[in-house]
Image (spheres, helix red, strand yellow):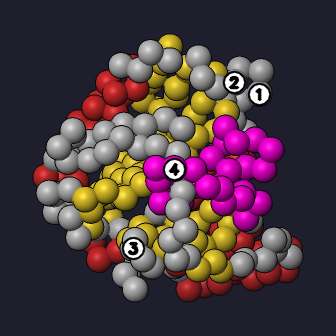
Amino acid sequence: TASFSISPKKASTLQECNNDDEESTLQLPRSLSKRRINLSIIALLVNGISPNMCNSVLAEELELERYTDSKEGFTLLRPSSWIKVDKAGANVLFEEENKGSNNAGVVVNPVRLNSLGEFGSPQFVADKLIMAEKRKESTKDAEVIAVSERSGQGGLQVYEFEYKLDSTRGGMKRIFTAAFVSSKRLYILNIAHLDKPESPLDVHTRMILEQVVHSFDSAPLA
């Protein structure tokens, strides 16, 4: 899994890992009937678009399920077919079955920041991320594709990044990252998926991974 560090004094490098933190999983239906999809479209036209409704319908269609860690205070959607695995270093890690190079992991570390904005703009953080990748001996090339910012729970500042990574460890990959600071803790979601010239990332898979990264947010602590 690709990694970056916000600052040597403020955050640890992202690693593939997992622990036995508390979790709750909400199973979603695997498919939608044509009638239900049509009714949803009609409802949107009549009542206007509701973000929560759109997200719920899309999550069902893409076979995503909710994962919440109430001990560490984060939540996200994850592909229902991906399995949770144990690896040292991060709070949770999900992998596509029989394709461990396709994975999504979350790391939580204490920081002295109240928000990511105190460290820098999304572009500034993206530049640091790519610099960290290029310093690795295994990295052949790294290129930023997209940088954005959104509001999370309670107006939480969330940064999102997408970039291409070509390395001697796993070949070409597409990386999706989301990060935020809450209660003086840095939360990082890192998603890696193979994106080779002979088998590029398809549109459907890309939609799934984008929904996962967009869903990453804070959750009430238990």
Residue 86 position within the rendered picture, expressed as x and y whole percent measured from the top left:
61, 55
The amino acid at mark 2 is Lys
Mark closer to the chain start, 3 or 4: 3
Residue lying at 48% horizontally and 60% vertically, measured from the top left: 91
State whether residue 152 is above or below residue 103: below
Disc 4 crowd, CA 10 A, few/some/many (<14, 14-19, 20+): few
Is residue 75 covered in magenta? no
Q: CA distance from mark 1 to mark 2?
A: 5 Å
- Left or right: residue 128 versus residue 214 is left
Mark closer to the chain start, 4 or 2: 4
Which quadrant of the figure contains the C terminus?
A: bottom left
Residue 123 position within the rendered picture, expressed as x and y whole percent measured from the top left:
27, 37
Residue 73 position within the rendered picture, expressed as x and y whole percent measured from the top left:
39, 73
- The picture quadrant where one finds residue 201 is top right
The amino acid at mark 3 is Gly
The residue under label 4 is 88
Q: Determine whether label 1 and label 4 are within 8 Å by CB.
A: no
Q: Determine whether label 1 and label 2 are within 8 Å by CB.
A: yes
- Dot 3: what SS? loop
Residue lying at 36% horizontally and 41% vertically, measured from the top left: 13
Disc 1 crowd, CA 10 A, few/some/many (<14, 14-19, 20+): few
State whether residue 185 is above or below residue 47: above
The residue under label 2 is 196
- Dot 1: what SS? loop
The residue under label 3 is 73
The residue under label 1 is 199
- Left or right: residue 221 versus residue 34 is left
Residue lying at 42% horizontally and 54% vertically, measured from the top left: 107
Magenta span? 80-106
Q: Nearer the viewer, mark 1 or mark 3?
A: 3
Q: CA distance from mark 1 to mark 4?
A: 30 Å
The amino acid at mark 1 is Ser
